Amino acid sequence: MNDKLKELLNDKQFGIPFTLNNEESIAEKTGSSLKEIEDVAMSQGIVPLRFQRNLGAISLEEQRILLHSKVSVIGCGGLGGFVIEELARLGVGEISAWDYDYFEEHNLNRQLMSETRLIGQSKTEAVSKRVNKINPLVKLNSIYREFNEDAGKEMLKEQQVVVDALDNIKSRLELSETCRCMGIPLVHGAVNTWYGQVSTQFPGENVIEQLYEGKETSMSGVKKPSVLVFMPAMVASLQVAEVLKILLNRGNLLRQKIMMLDMLSMDIEVIDVPGNED
Amino acid sequence: MKVTVKLFAYLRDGRFKVKEMEFEEGTTVQKVLEILSIPKKELEIGIMMINGKRTSFDGVLREHDTLALFPPVAGG
């Protein structure tokens, strides 16, 4: 199969630019999936036009790594919507989108995937449709269930990175523990009003526990869940940058650090949070 | 004694980002919260640091310390 594909791809008619239409016509001729075609094309040094403007920042080999990458995003609300959009546009091949909620009118101020006509529909379904429109090669797994440790242990196998886009402390702590047990890096993000925070936790580290442990029932009395749209957009973008670097093993990560963002003062600060000694 | 107090996220609302303040010797973190009218509840679930190390409400401040207070941010 790959030989036939390689032969077809060497044909000058599929030269530059290599478009999605090219890929679809090869799929028709060969019965290969778009993902197989794109994989072979990239292995031959052929740049899919969709990703032409990624290259330079990342290499074609790295683009191909993304095609074979698996990332889970826990929560498809404010943070999760932007995270998934960006992962799909980057070219991550398999995205698992978790949520058990549906859109409500008060989501429209900040949740990228929400639309007036989608009020009452499940968030994971909306995410699935949108991703298919952005990058039809993404295998999008809609996981319509609440996150807990059991669900995580069942569904997070083989995931390379997990994104914490949750909205409550209890689930964040369960996710942190689950990722630690399963040896999966976790990229944390959280927002409130004009403020946000980002951190990356590898197995063996405990930044999330330092932030929240013992406090899971104490959120009453804390600020109302007001969030301005640029906060999830910013924090999600920073989370995706962390995911990309983990997948490609490049650059510097926010490990044992928290980046605190204050968009009212236009102030960003990175604070060291060394691990507990125990 | 002089202590630098740094506030983060919504603790800054109506207060400040960073300020050098004058306290009596032996002042605890809890006392600073009272002086700044920060409800203890907001820090029960946040992080408090003196010179970059975790501390508690009973943590005692010394001359030229930096106290940093982070409330919980957990929305998504």
Image: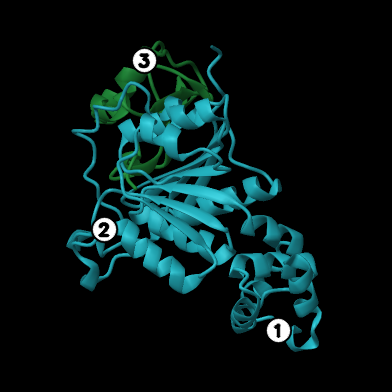
Which label sits in the foreground, 2 or 3? Answer: 2
Please give the residue where the numbered disc 2 appears in the rendered image: A122
Please give the residue where the numbered disc 3 appears in the rendered image: B28
* Real-space CA distance between mark 2 and mark 3, rounded to the nearest whole angstrom: 49 Å
Q: Nearer the viewer, residue A177 or B55?
A: A177
Q: Nearer the viewer, residue A31 or A51?
A: A31
Please give the residue where the numbered disc 1 appears in the rendered image: A17
- Residues beneath discs 1 and 3 located on the same chain: no
- Residues beneath discs 2 and 3 located on the same chain: no
Residue B34: tell me if it is visible.
yes
Residue at 45% x, 29% y is: A178
Could you say where residue B22 lies in the image, as x and y percent from the top left? 40, 25
Dot 2: chain letter: A
Chain A colour?
A: cyan
Secondary element type, mark 1: loop
Q: Is residue B18 left or right of residue A192?
A: right
Task: Supply the letter of whichever chain is green.
Answer: B
Looking at the image, the residue that sits furthest to the bottom is A13
Q: Name which quarter of the figure residue A89 lies in.
A: bottom right
Tell me if residue A140 comes above or below residue A219 in the rendering: below
